Amino acid sequence: MSVFLGTHQNRLDAKGRVSIPAGFRTALRAQAAAGEALVILRPSHQYPCIEAWPTAAFAALSQPLDRLDMFSDEHDDMAAALYADAYPVDADREGRIILPDTLKEHAALTDSVAFMGLGRTFQIWEPAAAERRRAEARTRSRQLALPAQGRRQGGADA
C-alpha cells in the first residue's frame, strides 16, 4: 500500500487551486478505483487543518456507521460529522485541486499550504500551524511507547 510521507509546501493560487505533491498524487492514484474521486477532503475535528483521505480509506472510516440504527440520533450525528463537510475532489492535468472555501477558512489558508503526510492519509495546513503541530507531535511522541509487535500493551505476550 502506498503511504504519504514528508511535509511539502506549495502555493495556493487566487482561484483556490494548489498542486498536490507528486509523491502524494502517485499514492492517491495507486489507491483510486476507476470512477472514484482522487481524494476526499474534510475539516479535521481535532485541528485547524484539512484531512485528505484516499476514497477507499474514507469508505473504511465510515463502515462503523453500518452497525448503528439508521434512524438513531447516534447515526445521524456521526453521519453528519463524517459526510456533511466532506468533499470528493479530483486533480486537473497539472495535479492541482481546488480547495473549497469552507475548508480554506477552517484551516486559515491564504497563499501557501503545507501537505503533511500521515501514512495512510495526509493533512493540509497553514504552514506555520503545520510546523507548530509537528513540533507538538514530536514532543508528545517522546512520551509514548508503541507496543512491540506480538506483544500487548500490558507487556504480556499476545
Image: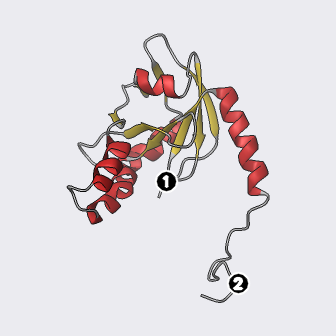
Residue ID at (67%, 88%): 156
**Circle 1 — which element?**
loop
Determine contact: label 1, label 2, CB under 8 Å: no
Q: Secondary structure at mark 2?
A: loop
Above-or-below relation of 110 to 53: above
Q: Nearer the viewer, residue 145 or 10?
A: 145
Which percent across, then down, holds residue 39? Answer: 38, 40
Q: Amino acid at mark 2?
A: Gly
Which image quarter holds the C terminus? bottom right
Left/right of residue 156 with respect to residue 80 in the rendered view = right
Q: Residue at x 34, y 55 (%)?
A: 62
Please tell me the numbered disc located at residue 155. Answer: 2
In the rendered image, the residue lying farthest to the front is 73
Comparing 36 with 152, the one in front is 152
Q: Position of residue 36 (x, y in %)?
A: 27, 43
Disc 1 designates what residue? 2
Q: Amino acid at mark 1?
A: Ser
| Crowd band around label 1 with a 10 angstrom C-alpha radius: few (<14), some (14–19), many (20+) | some
Residue 140 location (% of width, % of height): 75, 53
